[in-house]
Image: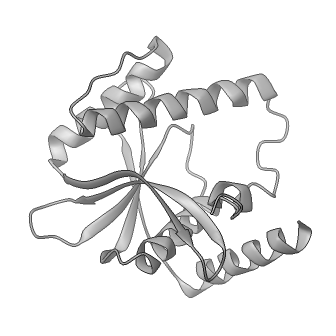
Amino acid sequence: HTEYPRVSEILGQWPRFEGIDPLILANKGDIGTAVHLAIKAHHEGIELPLRASEQGYYDSYLRWEQETKPIVHFSECTLQCCRLKFRGTVDAFMELSPGAPITLIDYKTSVKEDPKFWPAQGAFYCHLARENGFAIGPEYLFIKLDKKGGKPKIYEYKVTLEVWNFCVAALTTYTYRK
């Protein structure tokens, strides 16, 4: 249902980028979208052209992929939870080694980790995955891609009661305010 709010909308109800020029934020968003689309296309055997501002992030992903050799099960997978009435798009579900549990993956082109919102975003996505029948492992990875194509930084999280309680409160607050 397209009327269900996206995870990004739910978490976006709190200003986190105050003082940053809206044009810069829009450009960063465009870069992130292009990199995500290029990675999805790569998973499908298609190479998309990228602008110079995007190429380094993509190269950073390719570097991680070459080192990790993951088995990609799904890429850019949109899911919804009819019970709690929200939706989101998971960047990828991958096996990080043959026979390992499927891991939920999120790519980031951010300057730095967001230690409060990234774990919450991942917890929302884990809930969506499990509600939709995906048997995923307990950890999820956020891969902060490097702007210059270097080795990405990996952030591993687990859903905790504290984080999930925040998610439920965020969803309740969002729904109440609408």
Compared with 1, 15 (above or below) is above
Counting from the top left corner in percent of width and height, residue 89 is at 50, 55
Residue 77 at x, y percent in the picture: 42, 55
Residue 85 picture quarter: bottom right
- The quadrant of the image that shows the N terminus is bottom right
- Whether residue 65 is visible here, answered yes or no, is yes
**Residue extending furthest top?**
52
Percent of width and height locating residue 22: 80, 28
* Direction from residue 14 to residue 102 in the image, left or right: left
Residue 150 visible within the image: no
Q: Considering only vertical position in the picture, is 120 above or below 66?
A: below
Q: Is residue 32 left or right of residue 64?
A: right
Q: Nearer the viewer, residue 40 or 164?
A: 40
Q: Nearer the viewer, residue 151 or 22?
A: 22
Number of numbered labels in the structure image: 0
In the displayed image of the protein, which residue is found farthest to the bottom?
161
* Rendered residue at 26%/68% (across/down): 102
Quadrant position of the C terminus in the picture: bottom right
Q: Locate residue 110: give its quadrant.
A: top right
Residue 161, horizontal then vertical, whole percent: 57, 87
Residue 149 vs 137, above or below: the answer is: above
Question: Is 25 situated above or below 172?
Answer: above
At 48% from the left and 28% from the top, the residue drawn is 34
Which of the 4 image quarters holds residue 50? top left
Left or right: where 175 falls relative to 171 = right
Q: Residue at x 81, y 58 (%)?
A: 13
- Residue 59 versus residue 9: which sits nearer the camera? 9
For the rendered model, the colour scheme is: one colour
Q: Residue furthest front?
A: 1
Q: Can you name the residue that lies furthest to the left here?
A: 98
Residue at the image point whose x is 61% and y is 83% from the top: 83
